[in-house]
Amino acid sequence: MRQLISRGIEPFPEIRRRVDQLSAGSGIIIIAPFLPSPLIEKLGSEGFASKVERGRGSDWVVYFWRDLD
């Protein structure tokens, strides 16, 4: 996400593509220069669990995964 944003590209379509390919028990890590609250809320409403950590500098690291159920 960070690289796409730095190039002026909207990251959501790429994130959506990757998330749609995840199987149960799989996950994705998003590194962003800001806390991606709207993304966390959106994917949470779709049944994804998440964990947020502070990264280096101003980065945020968000882990998303689908539970095995």
Image (tube, rainbow, N blue to C red):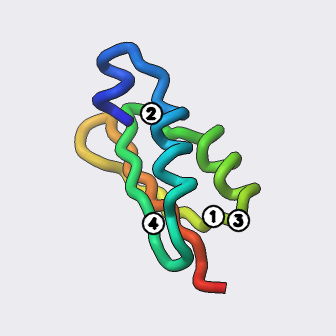
How far apart in space, not on screen, are marks 2 and 1 (Cα)?
20 Å
How far across and how far down the image is residue 54, in percent?
A: 36, 50
Looking at marks 1 and 4 on the same chain, the residue that comes earlier in the sequence is marked by 4
Q: Is residue 29 left or right of residue 67?
A: left
Check if mark 4's residue and mark 3's residue have beta carbons within 8 Å: no
How far apart in space, not on screen, are marks 3 and 2 (Cα)?
22 Å
Task: Please state which amino acid type lies under the numbered disc 1.
Answer: Phe
Check if mark 1's residue and mark 4's residue have beta carbons within 8 Å: no
Residue depicted at x 50% and y 64%: 22
Q: Is residue 23 left or right of residue 28?
A: right
Q: Which mark is residue 47?
A: 3
In this view, the residue in front, 58 or 17, is 17
Task: Please state which amino acid type lies under the numbered disc 2.
Answer: Phe
Q: Which mark is residue 21?
A: none
Task: Please state which amino acid type lies under the numbered disc 3.
Answer: Gly
In this view, the residue in front, 17 or 35, is 17
In this view, the residue in front, 50 or 56, is 50
Residue position marked by numbered label 4 in the rendering: 27
Q: Nearer the viewer, mark 3 or mark 2?
A: 3
Helix or strand or loop: what does disc 1 sit on?
strand
How far across and how far down the image is residue 11, in percent?
A: 46, 30
How far apart in space, not on screen, are marks 2 and 4 (Cα)?
20 Å
How far apart in space, not on screen, are marks 4 and 3 (Cα)?
12 Å
Disc 2: CA contacts within 10 A as few (<14), some (14-19) or many (>=20)? few
Q: Which mark is residue 48?
A: 1
Residue depicted at x 33% and y 32%: 2
Q: Nearer the viewer, mark 2 or mark 1?
A: 1
Disc 1: CA contacts within 10 A as few (<14), some (14-19) or many (>=20)? some
How far across and how far down the image is residue 33, in percent?
A: 37, 32
